[in-house]
Image (cartoon, rainbow, N blue to C red):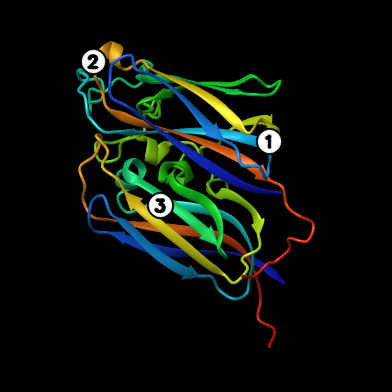
Amino acid sequence: MREKAIIETLSITKKGQIKHFQVRIPNNAERVIGIETGLRMISSFSFDFGDFFSFPTRMITPFPRNLLIGELKLQSCDEGNLFYTGEIHVRDFTTGYGDFSETEDFRSEEWTHGLRREEMEVVVKGDTTILTGFFRDRIGELFGDVQYEIKVIVWYEVKVKKDDCQPCS
Amino acid sequence: MVKLVEEHFDLQVTAANTTVSDTFELDKNIVAIKGFLITSDKDDMAYFRGSQRMEINKDEIFPEGYETKRVMSGISVPPMQRFYDLGGRHPGNGNIKVDFKDTDDGRTSFTPYRVRFYFYCEKTEDNQ
């Protein structure tokens, strides 16, 4: 089986905006096997964390709250129905939680201390042909109109023909 | 005898909101590609701004817009687990084409950076 991905991009511009969308699954898809999400900020916003992230007064043990961008749901047309529900956050502020080793010059960030990202594994038959999606903005409840893009990445397995064995092209 | 090796290739991103493309050629003795990892000399630039389309032997691995952060791992991950699993893919003609795209993100200001692509591979030794 070969694996391929489809990326659906949603543009959000208004507080509380709700997006309904569809992802078309190719005819040669055996099944949908994974879902990933991504975020690109277009406008910025400021949030006063006080001296929470300042060095050396940074507080390491209180658990910082991650800001919720929005909620995503995916539904298939077969018996799988609503098969994915997830939340998308602005950033992960928890990478440095309990880490007393950091210094002023080396701070824990997502790209220094982040874990390897894995897709959310799902099993949805490729017969569904269309996935219906729903995204609701939540960050607007705190900051009003915030502009950003959400990416929904759908991984699927491709049916391989028996005579499709060409290692070189 | 099969050895496990890492090959790496660089791309320089010198302007914001541009796409940098290149085709890399793996060593001819590579027989399988087990994993893939991206790093950068300015990690936050690649993390927030980067996305790439990649194909191996003209077979698409990542579509356009696949975020770079999804194939970056931090120091909290054991070294041999940081690679994106490619399942021992056959390299075919060994050509890897990458289209790396830099896109503005509200969390960063652009500065030129270098992106490095690591490939964890199985390699046979030359028979001489």
- Is disc 3 on the same chain as disc 2? no
Indicate the position of residue A69 as horizontal and vertical percent values: 36, 21
In-front residue for pair B16/A78 = A78
Please tell me how crowded label 3 is: few (under 14), some (14-19), or many (20+) other residues with Cα within 10 Å. Answer: many
Q: In this rendering, is residue A162 above or below A90?
A: below
In-front residue for pair A38/A19 = A19
Indicate the position of residue B65 as horizontal and vertical percent values: 42, 45
Q: For mark 3, name the chain.
A: B
Q: In this rendering, is residue B99 above or below A40?
A: below
Q: For mark 1, name the chain.
A: A
Q: Would you name the residue on which mark 3 appears?
A: B39
Helix, strand or loop under label 2:
loop
Q: Would you name the residue on which mark 2 appears?
A: A144
Helix, strand or loop under label 3:
strand
**Badge count:** 3
Q: Earlier in the sequence, mark 2 or mark 1?
A: 1
Indicate the position of residue B44 as horizontal and vertical percent values: 31, 43
Q: CA distance from mark 3 to mark 1?
A: 34 Å
Q: CA distance from mark 2 to mark 1?
A: 39 Å
Asked whether the viewer can see residue A3, the reply is: yes
Q: Residue at left 63%, top 34%?
A: A129
Q: Would you name the residue on which mark 1 appears?
A: A126
In-front residue for pair B29/B5 = B29
Q: Are marks 2 and 1 in contact (CB under 8 Å)?
A: no
Q: CA distance from mark 2 to mark 3?
A: 35 Å
- Is disc 1 on the same chain as disc 3? no
- Is disc 1 on the same chain as disc 2? yes
Mark 2, mark 3: which one is toward the viewer? 2
Q: For mark 2, name the chain.
A: A
Indicate the position of residue A104 as horizontal and vertical percent values: 24, 36
Q: In this rendering, is residue B26 above or below A5?
A: below
